[in-house]
Amino acid sequence: MTILVTGHSRGLGAALAAELLTRGYRVFGVSRGGNDDLAARFPDRFAQAAVDLGDPAAVQGWLTGGGLSAVLADGDDGAVALVNNAGTVAPVGPAGTLDAAEIARAVALNVTAPLLLADAFVAATEGRADRRVMHVSSGAARTAYAGWSIYCATKAALDHHARAVIADARPGLRIASVAPGVIDTDMQAAIRATTPEQFALRERFVALKESGSLSSPEDAARALADMLLAPRFGATATADVRDAG
C-alpha cells in the first residue's frame, strides 16, 4: 500500500509517517517543510514534496502538475490511502477579534487543501478496489469551544465531508474523519501560549500538560495507523481513537 500523508514534517504527521514506514508501507509526505530524518531512515520507501498546503494555488499547481499522479503510479499492490493531517488551530480568540488573513489561511489549510486533495485522489484512483481517505479531525469538530470558532468550524467541515462522500457510494472508496485525541505537539504549545481572553479553557490544557495527560505523537500515530489499516475502516463517517480502545 502507498499512503500519502500531509503535514509529515513534524508532530503527529511525522510520527504517523514513521509508524507507517516502520510497518513496511510506502509513504509520500506533502508539507511546506521536509523531513530529512525519514528520508535518511527509509530511502527506498519514503519520498516527499514541498507544497504550501495553506496556499490553494500551490496545492492546485501540484495536482495539475502531475504530483499526485506520480505518487500513485509508484504504488505496489494497487491499495492506496490519503491521510489529510496538516492543520492549524490559529487564529484563537472570540468572534470579532480575529485577523482576516489568519482566518483565510486556516480555512485554506484545514478545509480547502484536504478537500482538493481528497477529490483529486478519488478521481485518480477510480477503478482501484482498495482506496482510503482519512481526515484527521478533532473533538472540536463535535463540541464547540469559546475562542475556537474557526478551528471548530473547519474540523466540522471535514466530518461532514466524510459523511457526504460515504453517501456518494463510490466503488472501492472508504473514508472517515478521525479525532486523534489530545496530543503533546506544537499545536498544544500554541494553545498554552494563548491568553485567557483569547481562549477561556487555556488553564485546562495547561493542566493536561502538567499532569502528563497528553498523548505522545507516537501513541496517537499508532492508534491512527491501526484505524486506517483496519478492515472496518470507513464503517462510520466519524470516529475517535479514544473510543477504539
Image (cartoon, rainbow, N blue to C red):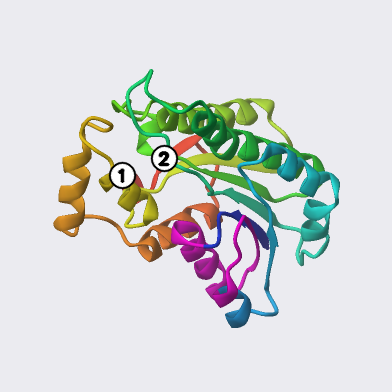
| Residue 216: percent from left, percent from top | 33, 62
| Residue drawn at 38 percent across, 18 percent down | 96
Q: Is 157 one of the magenta-colored residues? A: no
User: Where, by quadrant of the figure, is residue 175 drawn?
Assistant: top right
Q: 142 or 9: nearer the eye?
A: 9
Q: Which mark is residue 42?
A: none
Is residue 126 visible to us here? Answer: no
Q: Is residue 228 left or right of residue 91?
A: right
174 with respect to 197 (left or right): right
The structure residue drawn at horizontal position 50% and vertical position 33%, both measured from the top left corner, is 102
Compared to 10, does 41 lie above or below?
below
Which residue is the site of mark 1?
191
Q: Position of residue 86 (x, y in %)?
A: 54, 48
Query: Of residues 131 and 21, which is closer to you in this image?
Result: 21
The answer for how far apart the CA atoms under marks 2 and 1 are is 8 Å
Amino acid tagged 1: Ile
Classify the position of the N terminus by image quarter.
bottom right
Q: Which residues are magenta?
A: 10-37
- Which label is found at residue 89? 2
Give the crowd class for mark 1: few <14, some 14-19, many >=20 residues within 10 Å. Answer: some
Q: Residue at x 53, y 53 (%)?
A: 228
Circle count:
2
Q: Amino acid at mark 2?
A: Val
Q: In screen coordinates, is 177 left or right of 72?
A: left
